[in-house]
Amino acid sequence: MDVNTKKIIKNAWRVTKERGVTCLRIRVPGGHLEVKYLDLLKEIAEKYGNGTVHLTTRQGFEIPGIQMNKIDEINQMLAPVIQGLEMELGVPVTDETAGYPAAGTRNVAACIGNRVCPFANFDTTKLAGKVEALIYPNDFHVKIAISGCPNDCIKGHLHDIGVMGMVEPVYNQQRCIGCQACVKNCRQVSTGALSFVNYKVRRDPLRCTGCGECVLKCPAAAWTRGKQSYRLVIMGRTGKKNPRLARPFLEWADETVVLQVIKNMYAYIDRHIDRSLPKEHVGYIVDRTGYPVFREEALAGVTLNPEARVAAWMDWSGYRYERTSNMV
Amino acid sequence: MGFALTTEQFDAFLAGLARDYDIYAPKRLAGKGAFSGTDLIAYAPVQSLAEIVFDRKTFYSPKEILLPISQTLFYFTEEAYREPQQQQRPVIIFLRPCDVHAVKRLDQIYLHNGDQADPYYRERREKVKFFVMECTEGFDSCFCVSMGTNRTGEYAVFLRLEADRVLCDARPEFTPALAAYGREAPFTPAFIEQNKISVKTPEKIAPAVYGHPLWSEYDSRCIACGRCNVCCPTCTCFTMQDIFYEDNPRCGERRRVWAGCMIDGFTDLAGGHSFRNKYGERMRFKALHKVYDFKKRFGDHMCVGCGRCDDVCPEYISFSRIINRLAEVSDDE
Ligand code: SF4
Ligand code: SF4
Ligand code: SF4
Ligand code: SF4
Ligand code: SF4
């Protein structure tokens, strides 16, 4: 049996532990799809696979138990999924009957966002679609996730880029009844950015995370929603070497800035990746070049909105497995 | 007297009124809902018919126009105090029949409760004219018919919105203005005669109702957020705040600010005591005030059945259901 494994992997097919058997990975940008696509996935799983699907952490499907010699046939069948879930977002695909054009850049995941969640500051699935259109197809191994608020339910903190919705709370002291619901709640669930002075509420803008909780808690609409923007956390990862939580890179940045920075990150990877390795994750590239180089290149040509703030330095968290000296 | 005005004529009529009045009506405040991507329907100044929302109930009531949420009563220094100058222009409020009745409840408390009328309220109240919006369909949570607040004759102008025109019934004060912009047309106001929800209010409250298990359900269901108080057109409670300016604590101001019986701190006394710590007890207090005590004292129920408290409760607590349960247990006892 002759199979070009590099080629099928780029085509979103896996080399599995079982010889001659593969597994198909379906992308669902933003993790939300019309159920009509499930019929096709079911048909593939029943006819070619073992009748099951696996739900991935990245909000895709894996359809296991498929014979490798069926790849071309199934790629043909996939055309409606690639059309509906990729091309309609603006993803450039030259031949929708040839399966997925790349697999390095992973599905852009998103929490359920403001289509359902009351805490969400924006439509996460919609932004995921825009990001997908911007960066896919691409072979660089990059993981991006988008959350509606700093609760970060999609766990962008474990991604190369985590986007979180922020909103500027706007206070109208004339409407405030001084119940302190916002003050207590901010202290309890967020950052304690609010204080009660002379029976009115004061917000420390440097402490505020823009979560929007105060707006949700206020019974009198004394807090309302101002400008919606984003926090970008970068270079979170799991992996076998040095797992770490992402760190904030931008705050109060608007959508244009976020999209430009993501685009620039790919140019940065292209410039600095170690091509002698089979693959190198962007986080390890930043470890090599240092944060200042990343920052400069990520922000090249970007006009920051006036409210946006950029991390002056990076204090990476995380640990190295080989130095877990507390293991006795 | 009846008039018919096209949309354009009505806008011209409004523009004319705007010279003498501040005009408030239900308006869609884009993006101002608590949840992202939602609008708030609330009272705000309007200039044209298109801005006025007829097909939704406001989240907050028109009460805030007559009774500011936060109002400075006077400024003080060490030896003197002074009231702020009232520069209130006459006001037109577009509102529904139940809300007209609600203003009468405010009048009861602020004008006719004891021998002193509240001068701050009176100052504003005297300058208000009601433009009543016809309400014949109502909304899911309304129970005005049960509360007898579905009809009103207290208006300066009564309006019905039709596809491309507005029909008005006007009191003499506004007939010249309407005649100037529109044409005479027979029009008799209609009122809603049946709501989707009906309530039965308790006739008599037996003492056993106070300790009835019906209330304890709300100990855990209610979160004491106070939305039901803040949105209610008939909640009239306030608290006083003395503010000493940070720059110079020898002077300051006294403010009157809305308060609500469901909210923590409402019954706090010196020494840290507080009545009704349990939320079910607060609910009992509120319910009995709205549909029993007020009537005993003033002859009408305080609650006008606008249903806003049902609409805004984040915990889906229905006040109309509470009224019906209260009536049931009162009849049983
Ligand atoms: S991250 Fe925020 S918006 Fe998204 S599901 Fe969690 S709480 Fe909701
Ligand atoms: S947005 Fe969040 S962090 Fe900022 S003041 Fe409001 S509750 Fe606190
Ligand atoms: S929740 Fe609203 S009304 Fe209560 S203190 Fe905060 S801003 Fe004021
Ligand atoms: S709105 Fe609902 S939860 Fe809030 S205080 Fe009123 S009854 Fe309780
Ligand atoms: S208690 Fe509820 S239904 Fe009654 S007047 Fe107040 S908000 Fe309206």
Image (cartoon, helix red, strand yellow):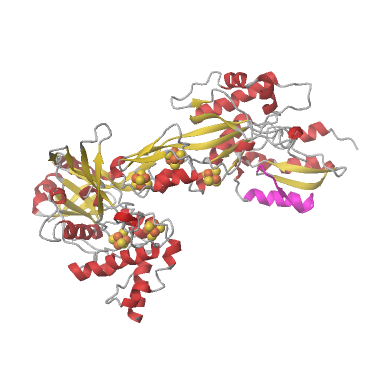
Give the image quarter of residue B322.
bottom left
Where residue A296 appears, as percent x and y from the top left, is 58, 18
In the image: residue A315, left or right of residue B159: right
Q: Report the residue that reaches farthest toward the bottom.
A: B332
- Looking at this rendering, what residue extends furthest in the right direction? A1
Residue A201 in view (yes/no): yes
Task: Determine the image quadrant of residue B193.
Answer: bottom left
Quadrant including the N terminus of chain A: top right
- The image shows residue A310, relative to residue A199, as above or below, that is above
User: Residue B12: x, y in percent?
Assistant: 19, 41
**Count of number-bearing discs:** 0
**Does residue A52 belong to the magenta stretch?**
yes
Of the four image quadrants, the one with ligand 2 is top left
Q: Residue furthest front?
A: B271
Residue at 36%, 37% (x, y): give it. A202
Extent of the magenta region: A36-58
**Residue B30 visible, this angle:** no
Name the side, left or right, on which B64 lies relative to A327.
left
In this view of the protein, which residue sits in the foreground, A100 or B213? B213
Q: Is residue B175 left or right of residue A25?
A: left
Give coordinates of residue A110: x percent, y percent.
Answer: 59, 41
Which quadrant holds the C terminus of chain A? top right
Q: Name the residue nearer the viewer: B267 or B44.
A: B267
Give residue A107's position: percent from left, percent from top.
65, 38
Q: Where B149 falls versus A118 (above or below)? A: below
Q: Please check the rendered image and state whether residue B189 is part of the magenta-colored stretch, yes or no.
A: no
Name the foreground residue: B320 vs B140. Answer: B320
